[in-house]
Amino acid sequence: MRQIRNVAGGSGRLYHGHRDRGVISGYVSTTSRGLEKTRRRGDDPHTTEFILPPRRTADYLLSIYWESSYAIFSFVNKLDFENSYSLLWTGFEDVSADEQAFHCNLNLMFAIACKLDQSGPPSDQAKSSDVYFERAKTLLKFDPLEVSRFALIQAFLLMAQYLQSTNMPRQCFQSIGMAIWIAQDMGLHMPQTTSTITNIRERELARRANPSIIAAMAFGRPSRISQEVAPEAPPLLPVDDGDFDYSDVGSRRSSQPAKMELYIEYCKLHFILGDILLALYVVPNQELTADEQKPKARSLTQDLDLLLDIDKRLIKWRSELGAHLQVSTHLADTTTLPLFHRQANILHARYVFALVV
């Protein structure tokens, strides 16, 4: 833990060791004992933002997040987060910056879950989602020098996830940019930074928090990460949280395919997508013609060579996917896990998107 604190700076702490319409109207007698104590003190301007929904509602929304969102973007350490979440219902004595960051991330997860929840009218879900998101934005206003920067990266990535489902693309892009800036400031894009962390689980958390491997391009703007730098990010292990065999880094306790494999393959595909956008859409410093009035046009042969090379890389990427991530597997066998079927569909959709681009 000392090593990861050295990487994180500040306090270095990663975290603290059923649908309900009440989210819209307010919360009554459902807060944890510790939160009630904090509110009575009246010395914290953000006290009302620490109110929790009923335990059943919170558990329900968090389960939706784990099953639907986390299965795609696994940059939060599920075990650590769930341990901290359990502590919320036992009470605590103070509201530190790390606690504030944790509540910010929790509310963002609730907001994302409301967007994904299909148990009620969409209008009600949207209102609930807005409540949680506004609460998270208020909680994000803390001193960044007093909180774990891992929690900050996760907060901005969660915020970007939420904003993807809204009509605020600029704010989404800005959230990704903030996450990238913090990660680069910590050096998470360099293998030597995280290689010194001996604890396998903590090292993987640090590497998952590096958003440079998933943000190749967004909303038609230039990539925030150089294509020369992005592939140098340390590779992730295809191991789920809680499934590490600490006696052997490369082995796993479970024989079932890791849910993390989707995230890893998603990143690999976006390396290729970044090259597509760089080669075909970003205008380089082109050489001028003799009259120095317009750049030389790229030849048709050059474009064809690029397209053939990219097409070859995409076909190779698809052929190397595990069987559980191939759509054809689930079409032939209807007994496969629904989660893997959904992951296969997601990767196929991203693959088609790369082809169209």
Image (spheres, grey):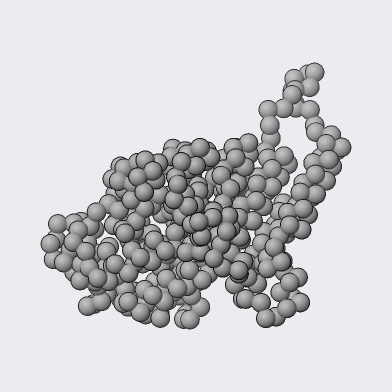
Vertical placement of 326 versus 337: above or below?
A: above
At x 71%, y 74%, the residue is 330
Question: How many numbered discs sit on the rendered protein?
Answer: 0
- Indicate the position of residue 136 as horizontal and vertical percent values: 35, 59
At x 46%, y 55%, the residue is 201
- Indicate the position of residue 328 as horizontal and vertical percent values: 76, 70
Residue 350: in sight, yes or no?
yes
- Indicate the position of residue 13 as horizontal and vertical percent values: 33, 50
Q: Residue furthest right?
A: 301
Q: Specify whether 221 is left or right of 139.
A: right
- The answer to which of 149 and 320 lies nearer the viewer is 320
- Indicate the position of residue 202 as horizontal and vertical percent values: 44, 52
Vertical placement of 116 versus 308: above or below?
A: below
Residue 148: in sight, yes or no?
no
At x 29%, y 70%, the residue is 52
Q: Specify whether 78 is left or right of 25.
A: right
At x 50%, y 56%, the residue is 247
Q: Residue furthest left?
A: 41
